[in-house]
Image (spheres, rainbow, N blue to C red):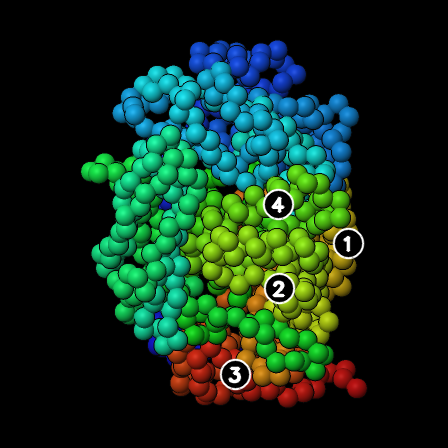
Amino acid sequence: MKFQNGSMLAILAIGAGFFTPSGFAQGSLEKVAVSLHDNWYVQSAANTSATGAQISTPGFAPTGWLRTSIPATPVGAQVENVIYPSPYIGTNAQQIPGWPPAGQNFANVAWPTGSPYSTTWWFLNQFTIPASLAGQRIYAHFDGINYRANLWVNGTQIANSTQMVGAYTAFEYDITSVAVIGGSNAVALDIMGPASSDLGIVFVDWYPLPADRNEGVWRDAWITNSGPVKVRFPQVQTSVSADLSTAALTVTAELSNPTASSVAGTLSGTITPGNITFSQAVTLPAGTASQVFTFTPSAYPQLNISNPALWWPARLGPQNLYQCSVQFTVGAATSDTNNFSFGIRKLDTGLGPVTPAGQRWRWFKINNQPILLKGAGWAPDMLVKRDPTRINNMIQLTLDMGMNMLRFEGKMEDQNFYDLADKSGILLMAGWVCCSQWEQWNSWSAENQAVANSSLHTQMKALRNHPSAFLWLNSSDLVPPAAVEQTEVNIENADLWPNPVVTDANYNTSTVTGLNGMREGGPYEWEPPIYFYSDTNQGGAYGFLDEGSVGPNVPVMESMITGLNENPVHWPIDSTWTNHMGGPPFDNLNVVTAAVSGRYGTAMNAADYVKKSQAQNYESWRAQFEAYETNKTKTDGTASTGFVSWMLTSGWFSLHWQTFDWYLRPSATYYGVKKSGEPLHILWDYGFQNNVMVTNDYYQGFAGLVATADILNFDMTNKYHNAVTLTAGPASSTVAFTIPRLHWQGDQ
């Protein structure tokens, strides 16, 4: 099947732009005076008798400690220092003591007896604060500590493990009284990893949680400074008029004055393009903490913008971004300043009409235009490593497949990632994770609730300026108790979260946030292509499916050889293969192997199996996305509005739930999804109604298209031919023609 239209071919040739990654940036919402990304030293508390006061004293010699960079974790440091081989490939991980059995949800069990990671570990960084910061207040910032820590700076304990707790909470401490300006300083953290009763990092059944559960300094850290007043968490809220002709901006910022004296000054800001300036006089009493100041468009008319440059998702328009600088000055001196970007876009959502089955499905519009959300579940690196170039490449692969969104199930990222998503036009759907203490609300301790609250505060403030962030889920698989969810909503409102919130990813109704209009539940194993057109109970193309796919995805042979760390690859399939599957029941290839054998013939060897798997994966992964495109314009309430493929890729070398493998090497799946992702596309519905369809994601129509279909006999003679001229309307799905029933030799 093909198009015959010269101008259309030119349009189809347009591809996604590529962004050149810069050097490692902190991705912070504040200025960085001293980066603490590198030069960490790691040691088990069992191997040192030194105290926190001694370890954090400048000049302490970390002899025999492991040197590493953030993410500073025990296993990561041991692998980097070649104490253990790479756990990503083969059976290497089993050489690391305490590594969980294949398929175990390690977050939910006790630390193994004798595990070297069940004790605390020390993390030390020695650095210099430049003399130019004399007279400034000095702060130590930690974007992520897993899980609880005692913090020492220059021989003084700053925080204990009941105060510094929570993997998804950012921490900042005023260390002015102990900082050595123009000299040597040291930060030491005594960190304990999460217990099964903690709200830690969870990989569920996706891939292994390492033996150390990624305990340590897993997100970036830095030293920052200010004058007597610091500026934190600036935000620009946007309200776009119905006709998109104007936008009203509201700017807020938090100010703190930790000094013993009242401070008077000016809070001001600038927004570009447009060179919009605003300011107000402020007096902060001594000891003021996190007081919010607001600039409204009614009080500051210059914050009403005509003809705003709108932000659009990928392929649908430009990713226009504005820059905002907010600062506080005392007299002629700048006390503190924050710079950040934001986007202006109009986001609408609602529930469609009631379907014949009594359901209602959530839809979204961007800048008054309907959008079919097409994406995948995000899977971070198994050792939570962050390579900016690798992440940039993963985003480009996502764009190349025609996807426009990613789902974070409890795997939120940092400002670098969010900035890249903004620039790339990738929408972000975020929320908490399933299948762990995160959803065991009845057994939550007071500390669990406090950590949940502080974690949500951190994520709201990290995401809220980004036009790419469009939806937050208060849970994953289950509806939280009303009191818990009401606490979440209160935090979201207090933090001025500007986007929709739903209760969870399953089709559920909450007494707090109402009907979510979304569903998960698979499929998670192979299904034939027609399934996505015919199914009306699980993964078929109706409504918003936020989790599902055809499961296993065996990589190409080049990756199999390196990923399984064997050449030739073992045959028949054995534990060297299934070790790189997921948790039960997704710990084997039985379903997909039966399908390969039935559709393509029994594989004779590993190479034959990989080859046949590629053919099968191509048609199945392509069909699931095509089916959602096909049904996006239905009017009976069953229109498809979103599809999240499970998953984008894996955090280690894997044989399932991925569109490209751990080496970023595309398989046939990748090309099947990419084909389905053509913004102007022709497809066949695999005999469900025997329709040839033309789908159009553009917000403009195309006339004079010629849709052609040919069906060939096995001897390559033509059994059927048809060509139809048609018009594809904006954001449409159009039946070109229906192929009649054909009679073949042997038909009854």
Q: Amino acid at mark 1?
A: Asn
Note whether 402 is above or below 82 in the view shown: below
Q: Which residue is mark 3?
A: 734
Q: In the figure, residue 84 lies in which quadrant?
A: top right
Residue depicted at x 37% and y 54%: 294
Give the residue at x 59% y 38%.
166
Quadrant into which the C terminus falls: bottom right
| Identity, as a three-letter code, of the amino acid under mark 3 | Thr
Q: In the displayed image of the protein, which residue is found farthest to the right?
A: 748
CA gap between label 4 and label 2 equals: 18 Å
Are the residues tagged 2 and 3 within 8 Å (C-beta)?
Answer: no
Q: Does the CB distance between marks 4 and 2 fall below 8 Å?
A: no
Q: Nearer the viewer, mark 3 or mark 4?
A: 4
User: Circle 1: is it few (<14), some (14-19), or many (20+) Cα within 10 Å?
Assistant: some
Density class for disc 2 (Cα within 10 Å; few <14, some 14-19, many ≥20) is: some
Q: Residue 6 location, x and y as percent?
A: 36, 77
- As measured in the structure, the alpha-carbon distance from the residue carrying label 4 to the one carrying label 1 is 39 Å
User: In the structure shown, which secondary structural element does the residue marked by tag 4 occupy?
Assistant: helix
Amino acid beneath label 2 = Thr
Q: On screen, 350 above or below 474?
A: below
Label 1 or label 3, whichever lies nearer to me, is 3
Residue 675 location in percent, x, y? 51, 66
Residue 513's tag is: 2
| Residue 396 visible in the displayed image | no
Quarter of the view holding residue 481: bottom right
Q: Which residue is mark 4?
A: 452
Q: Give the mark nearest the N terminus, 4 or 1.
A: 4
